[in-house]
Image (cartoon, rainbow, N blue to C red):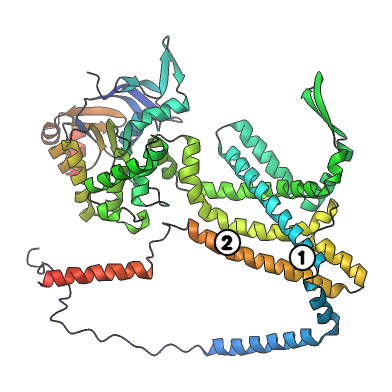
Amino acid sequence: MNAMVDARNVYKKFGALEVLRGITLNVQPGEVTCIIGPSGSGKSTFLRCINHLEQIDAGRLYVDGELVGYVERDNVLHEMPLRKAARQRRDIGMVFQRFNLFPHVTALDNITMSMVHVKKAPKEQARTRGLELLEMVGLSSKAHAYPAQMSGGQLQRVAIARALAMDPKLMLFDEPTSALDPELVGEVLEVMKDLAERGMTMVVVTHEMGFAREVADSLVFVDRGVAVEAGVPAQVLDSPAHERTKTFLSKVV
Amino acid sequence: MATAQSQPGSSPESGSSPAPDWIRAKPLRHPGRTIWAVVIVVGLALFIYGAATNPAYDWSTYLQYLFDQRFWQAAGITLLLTVLAMALGVVLGVALAVMRLTPNRIMQSVSWVYVWIFRGTPVYVQLVFWGLFSTIYPHLQFGIPFFHSFFSVETASFAENVFWLAVIGLSLNEAAYMAEIVRGGIQSVDEGQSEAATALGMSRAMALRLVILPQAMRSIIPPTGNEVISMLKTTSLVTAVPYTYDLYARARDLSVETFNPVPMLLIASTWYLAFTSVLMVGQHYLERHFAKGASKVMSDRQLQALADAEQIHASQDNR
């Protein structure tokens, strides 16, 4: 079986700045991987590389066995045509720190928009599925509310439902609770936990160590663009092998 | 910590505590406002009296010609010029804005140069140029340059269609302004929006149509309303083409005919004002449509619904 995410020695530069310096990481189907690390360590950039919001500069990155962002022919890499890249992204759901819900349409329309226009699902079917997803995240009553009328926790739950609407095989979470009031963090983590229990493959960049410990199958500590340490959450959190991990954990916990 | 905790549901227990003594304060006085109102009303009354009794305005001629066929026909033409020039200008303007924002350098440059030229020269001069089009380019050839011509068009026929030359002249100028307005609108939309759309597998065009433009509309519409009103009045310059069937040209013609210019100009102004008033109403409704979801402020009905929900909640807690 293919690994869901297979990153091999991935590099990413912004101008002269090397943000990722050889990340190697593996996520099996059905697994939840949490990525932790100091801010500016490149963990969000790495996540954005997985669905090709950023283009990698060296190494290889595969999702479900398929090369991301490039087409390889006769050992030569070609930039991927935009249409093909868009098709690749359909199978990868993404949840952003700042929610990025579409403010000009209702919660339900946020969810159904991509189903109707990208997947070309019939409107009625999209609507039914949209309401189902809203129920799953506990927001049936907010179907016709606009984002401006919802709390941060509700927004993020709608955003998760929106990503799920495309039936992704992989979900990426970019610090999904970092922009939330502390009292609202729990409701979002609850939805994520529920999703993990349903067997969704997830890569989660987070600062929520409790969530990582409880839900994640593996935990990766990223610092200065490399995966310093990876393993079972309890082991990494309780007895980190590397000095840098120890230093970081002593500051957060 | 535990000691500081109050009992759960310590919200006002509507049953036990008496209704609060709602504040009914005496409103603050604003004597300055009253004084200004009097000054302005008196000034206005004097002006109206002066205008009504000034023979130069010649109100009887004004009334006689206000709904004259020649005037309302010209008003219709002015309106048609405005609508056509604006419609073409908006379409071309959106195209130019999108070109400006693509990663394609050539498209960017074309758009930039277009805006530079058409915004940088007076519309009056541009209209004169369009009038001279058939003089500058007597015939247009279509084919492979310097090699073979498939067919050629004599532009002398264009000169007869002065109306369309006016429309083209106005709309190409307008496109330059609309391009800047649309570009500003698109850039005002948060970057996270196109990112979210991209992550959902949308193409650039789809994201633009479904996500970016609808949000950009909020900042595009007010200045565009401005442009429409401005265009309505700019049509008075089509005399440069020369096209002479619009409202202002008609007012001048009738001024000469009647040797009485003031009421004719008043009539033209009245028509212009009537149209702009209607346009302002239209703009209001458009703005309201595209403001959907923009405000946290809830309508009175929504607030009432929330208050009702609280009531039910409180009564359940008390039970």
Secondary structure type for disc 1: helix
Identity of the residue drawn at 77% across and 65% down: B72
Q: Report whether residue A19 is seen.
A: no
Identity of the residue drawn at 70% across and 51% down: B84
Name the foreground residue: A199 vs B40: A199
> Which amino acid type is marked by label 1?
Trp
* Quadrant position of residue A195: top left
Q: Which mark is residue B72?
A: 1
Q: Tell me if mark 2 has few (under 14), some (14-19) or many (20+) residues whose alpha carbon lies within 10 angstroms of its own.
A: some
What residue is pinned by disc 2? Answer: B283
Identity of the residue drawn at 70% across and 57% down: B231
Image coordinates of residue A92 in percent, x first then y, are 32, 32
Q: Are marks 1 and 2 in contact (CB under 8 Å)?
A: no
- Disc 1 versus disc 2: distance between alpha carbons? 24 Å
* Letter of the chain that mark 2 sits on in the rendering: B
Image coordinates of residue A114 in percent, x first then y, are 38, 39
In-image side of B117 versus A85 (left or right): right
Secondary structure type for disc 2: helix
